[in-house]
Amino acid sequence: MKIALINENSQAAKNEIIVKALKEVVEPMGHSVDNYGMYSAADEAQLTYVQCGILGAILLNSGAADYVITGCGTGAGAMLAMNSFPGVICGHVQDPVDAYTFAHVNDGNAVSMPFAKGFGWGAELNLTYVFEKLFGFGHGQGYPKERVVPEQRNKKILDGVRAVTMRPLLECLDAIDQELLKGAIAGEKFQELFFANCKDEAIEAYIKKLL
């Protein structure tokens, strides 16, 4: 699994802490991590939490990433931005129980975390435990045991509802303010990481045209 990390501007200074914890947990499991930044608060390309949602949706829908880790001060804004797009099911994850139950009950492909609220003493330990529970025990297996069948059925129902309520991503990108969109893909390593991993020719062509 290819996991993408995206940080917005208010919490960019914590990128190094987050990517270190993420890599230490998931790389031994056989997963890889692409760090899309922001890498520091002084980065030339400044991402808002809204742009984290745009970038995350591009990565997931194009196949450039299989999973996205993002967040903001509370985690709520980035979660809302991510869930504004097709092909994305993003959960709000603050602790290991959130991570485990989201992975098994909701079976999404992105999480948004609070990187300011509650991010104090032991924060790096919480990150480690969250990533262990999020990626170390599979996905979509249901929880608790007696709820496995209805939980899996509900996930399929949710997927069906979203299929008829969401527009295709390219329509969304075309309708978004283009300067906002350009800012979302202006990161220092975006082009290097994205074009090496993108699996959707139409999305790739659109991004190239935009750049």
Image (cartoon, rainbow, N blue to C red):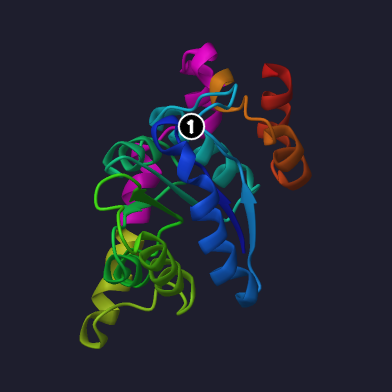
Residue displayed at 40% across by 29% down: 50
Residue 37 sits above or below residue 32 on the image: above
How would you classify the magenta stretch by its main secondary structure?
helix
In the picture, the quarter occupied by the N terminus is bottom right
Q: Name the one closer to the observer, 194 or 171.
A: 194
Q: Name the one closer to the observer, 26 or 64.
A: 26
Residue 203, how many percent across, how many down?
A: 66, 33
Q: Residues within 10 Å of mark 1 (few under 14, many from 20)?
A: many
Residue 74, how many percent across, how many down?
A: 27, 43
The number of callouts visible is 1
Asked where in the image residue 44 lies, by quadrant, the reply is: top right
Asked where in the image residue 201 lies, by quadrant, the reply is: top right
- Residue lying farthest to the front in this orientation: 121
Residue 67 at least partly seen = no
Q: Name the one closer to the observer, 97 or 176.
A: 97
Residue 11, how many percent across, how many down?
A: 41, 38
Residue displayed at 49% across by 28% down: 47
Residue displayed at 63% across by 69% down: 27
Q: Is residue 170 magenta?
A: yes
Q: Quickly name the residue at label 1.
A: 54
Residue 184, how many percent across, how many down?
A: 54, 26
Element at label 1: helix
User: Which stretch appears magenta?
Assistant: 158-181
Residue 178 sits above or below residue 115 on the image: above
User: Along the horizontal axis of the image, is 209 left or right of 89?
Assistant: right
User: Along the horizontal axis of the image, is 208 left or right of 15?
Assistant: right
